[in-house]
């Protein structure tokens, strides 16, 4: 079964607008971590933001914030004030408990329009 | 200064050949990984090593063999390359503690002709 679901294969957003990229996850472990990574066309994987399952507040890192809804098992990435350089693939990932296994979602390709 | 490095960046080879990809991290991390990213961008873990010991070995053909000579290195050797092995291979490392992100290398694009 898919542990990480990203239902939007592609998204478009106008420059300077905000955009939400969806991520839902499936785990029975009460301890887990959720991550978002960006992969621009150059190919490298860039860590963006992390949310722990016990964190009370939603994570924020600059223009990135994570809308964590634990009961719904969702961890959506919100990018505010989109820039052309935000055009990339975005991957949601989960790490369960104390294991070293990261599971990645299929990714969402974001295109920012001028 | 590079945190996680991989060599080579590009590898083009004929079917049936044997090739290796090297990975090194200078972050002092305990855990290293190999991922395969296919043409549809799907990332799948192949192997994970913690302090030179194999801890994750997903279902990959036994033509793929990881080797960890020390904590800072995790190499990937592939025997009898097939067309379907063409992909981007990423090495990554993490501290090994809970809830820490992985640091990825730049990737190695393998093309099998």
Image: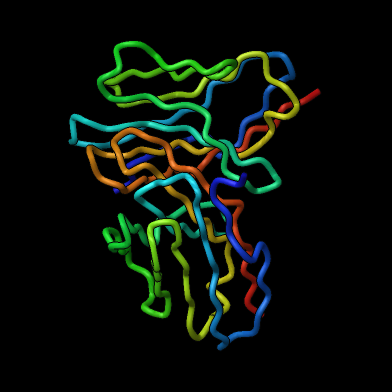
Q: Is residue A102 left or right of residue A15?
A: left
Looking at the image, residue B6 lies above or below residue A83:
below
Q: Nearer the viewer, residue B50 or A43?
A: B50
**Residue shown at the point (61%, 61%) measured from the top left:** B108
Q: Position of residue A15 (x, y in %)?
A: 74, 19
Q: Quadrant of residue B22?
A: bottom right
- Left or right: residue A40 versus residue B21 is right
Question: Residue at the spot x=42%, y=46% of the render?
Answer: B28
The location of residue B15, given as percent across then percent down, is 60, 85
Using the image as rendered, state which of residue B34 and residue A6 is in the foreground: B34
The answer to which quarter of the image holds residue A40 is top right
* Quadrant in which the C terminus of chain A is drawn: top right
Residue A23 vs residue A64, the one in the foreground? A64
Q: Residue furthest right?
A: A114
Measuring 48% from the left and 15% from the top, which residue is drawn there?
A: A60
| Vertical placement of residue A26 versus A82, above or below | below
Colour pattern of the rendering: rainbow
Q: How far across and how far down the image is residue B87, in percent?
A: 58, 64
Residue B62: % across, % down: 36, 78
Residue at 62% from the left image edge and 44% from the top image edge: B1
Residue B39: tell me if it is visible.
Answer: no
Would residue B44 be found to the left or right of residue B49 on screen? right
As drawn, the residue found furthest toward the bottom would be B16
**Number of marks in picture:** 0
């Amino acid at each position: 079964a898919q542990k990480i679901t990203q239902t939007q294969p592609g998204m478009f957003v106008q420059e300077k607008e905000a955009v939400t990229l969806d991520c839902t996850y499936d785990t029975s472990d009460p301890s887990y971590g959720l991550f978002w990574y960006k992969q621009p066309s150059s190919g490298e994987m860039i860590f963006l933001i992390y949310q722990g399952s016990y964190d009370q507040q939603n994570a924020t890192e600059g223009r990135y914030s994570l809308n964590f809804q634990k009961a719904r098992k969702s961890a959506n990435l919100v990018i505010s004030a989109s820039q052309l350089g935000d055009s990339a693939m975005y991957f949601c990932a989960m790490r369960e408990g104390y294991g070293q296994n990261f599971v990645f979602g299929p990714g969402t390709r974001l295109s920012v329009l001028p | 200064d590079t945190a996680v490095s991989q060599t080579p960046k590009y590898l083009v080879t004929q079917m049936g050949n044997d090739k290796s990809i090297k990975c090194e991290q200078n972050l002092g991390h305990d855990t290293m990984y190999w991922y395969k990213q296919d043409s549809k961008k799907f990332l799948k873990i192949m192997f994970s090593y913690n302090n030179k010991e194999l801890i994750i070995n997903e279902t990959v053909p036994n033509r793929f063999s990881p080797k960890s000579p020390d904590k800072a290195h995790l190499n990937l050797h592939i025997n009898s390359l097939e067309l379907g092995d063409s992909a981007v291979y990423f090495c990554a490392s993490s501290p090994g503690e809970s809830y820490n992100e992985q640091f990825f290398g730049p990737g190695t694009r393998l093309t099998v002709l």
